[in-house]
Amino acid sequence: MNEAILLVGGKGTRLQPLTLSRPKPMVSVAGVPFLAHLVARARAAGIERLVMATSYLPETFRAYFGDGSAFGLRLEYVTETEPLGTGGAIRNAARLLTGGPDSPVAVLNGDILSGTDISLLVERHRAADADVTLHLTRVDDPRAYGLVPTGPDGRVLRFLEKPTTAADIVTDQINAGCYVFRRSVIDSIPAGRPVSVERETFPALLASNARVLGITDDAYWLDLGTPEALVRGSADLVLGRVASPALPGPCGEALLLEGARVAPDATVAGGSTIGPGATVHSGAHVSGSILLDGAVVEAGAVVRDSVIGAGAVIGAGTVLDCAVIGDRARVGSGNELRTGLRLWNGAVLAPDSVRFSPDPRTSIPAQSGVQHAAAL
Ligand code: GDD
Ligand code: MG
């Protein structure tokens, strides 16, 4: 039986307000909760049993995925009363594994969009008789990740999680958030307390000379933890730059879900997703963006690289770039917001109140209106 653990307990703080009402892996990406892409990918790699390690808003996962039968595999759930960190979550979820001490267990971060074939990692792990095998990828700026230098034989030399000193930036090779563990290694992680697999478990395994293997490839890879990455990943799925068995329609410039309406003279492009019941009115342009259920883009508005929350309304003629607009929020007509505005769920921005680029960190809380907008 091929088994895996999915780490889905994070709070997704960087994606607020989208993650106030749903956990990060349940945010809609290319028409389905992101996790549906990940589950489909695991299934395609031959995973038959998957344990979801939940913590934040745990009930939302079971409500969507149930026992997994609709997704072609068996799903189990464990919930941490207090978040146990990545290592603690893996240890806690292992209670529900059925394999013996030498069985390989795949472990996946719940926010990674990747084209890597997990079954190849498992094969290489078995062939090398490794204790842990890590999928690695290369990025331009590795500082926000776990740095993982390897030797010529692929053995991992060090694990440096989010290093803060320049001397520790020793490689552009990073932990891609997908591992294969020997079951007995998981059972040796301390139980009942928070453990970081990146800061504690991996360094300890290396110090004890365990066989930790790194496999680097150049497959598509993106951590969807920020709004910019979320819209990029969604657009890449819609455009077909990375394949997903869970994409609910054909690849193309835009994915229109059931009940979506686009006026004949509006344009939807760049891998946009127009969610169920969402409307794009006459002359509007939507590109590289996600419109969630029932969102409305009024006539002549321009929405680029943004997420528009469920039931939110973008007023006529308004221009939005890289924005995250919360559920049911309203951006009045005639505004121009070019750098990463976040509007909280239910917040209202009055018409004609912003005509220049606010600070990228600007966010407007719920119940704000003209005054806040003027203050910008
Ligand atoms: N169950 C549970 N409990 N899950 C957790 C917890 C917890 O306490 N904390 C984090 N997770 C889950 C998150 O939901 C996410 O799927 C995964 O663990 C990784 O957490 P992130 O918060 O997304 O970490 P990161 O992106 O900053 O860094 C990690 O991923 C990088 C690759 O994207 C690290 O593993 C880095 O080493 C790695 O390079
Ligand atoms: Mg992440």
Image: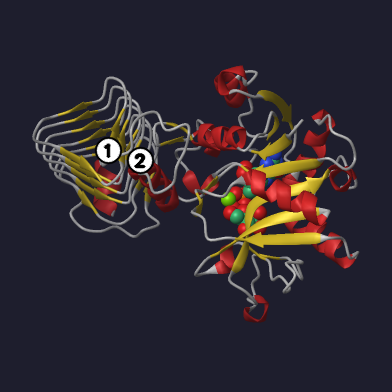
Kindly identify the amino acid type of the residue bearing the numbered disc 2: Val
Residue at the spot 90% in from the left edge and 47% down from the top edge:
188
Left or right of 283: which side holds 231? right
Left or right of 217: which side holds 232? left
Residue carrying label 2: 238
Provide the secondary structure element on which disc 2 rests.
helix
Residue contact between numbered discs 2 and 1, judged by CB atoms under 8 Å: yes
Distance between the alpha carbons at the discs numbered 2 and 1: 7 Å
Placement of 2 over or under 352, stated as above or below: above
Residue in front for this viewpoint, 347 or 265? 265
Residue carrying label 1: 254
- The C terminus lies in quadrant: bottom left
The disc label shown at residue 243, or none? none
Q: Position of residue 168 (x, y in %)?
A: 67, 76
Residue at the spot 40% in from the left edge and 52% down from the top edge:
228
Q: Quadrant of residue 282?
A: top left
Q: Position of residue 122 (x, y in %)?
A: 72, 46
Left or right of 34: which side holds 330? left
Residue in front for this viewpoint, 79 or 170? 170
Q: How many neighbours does mark 1 have within 10 angstroms: few (below 14), some (14-19), or many (20 or more)?
A: many
Q: Position of residue 233 (x, y in %)?
A: 42, 47
Kindly identify the amino acid type of the residue bearing the numbered disc 1: Ala
Q: Position of residue 320 (x, y in %)?
A: 24, 48
Decide if ligand 2 comes within 8 Å of the CB at mark 1.
no
Q: Of label 2 and label 1, which has the lower sequence position?
A: 2
Residue at the spot 70% in from the left edge and 43% down from the top edge:
107
Say if residue 272 shows up in the picture.
yes
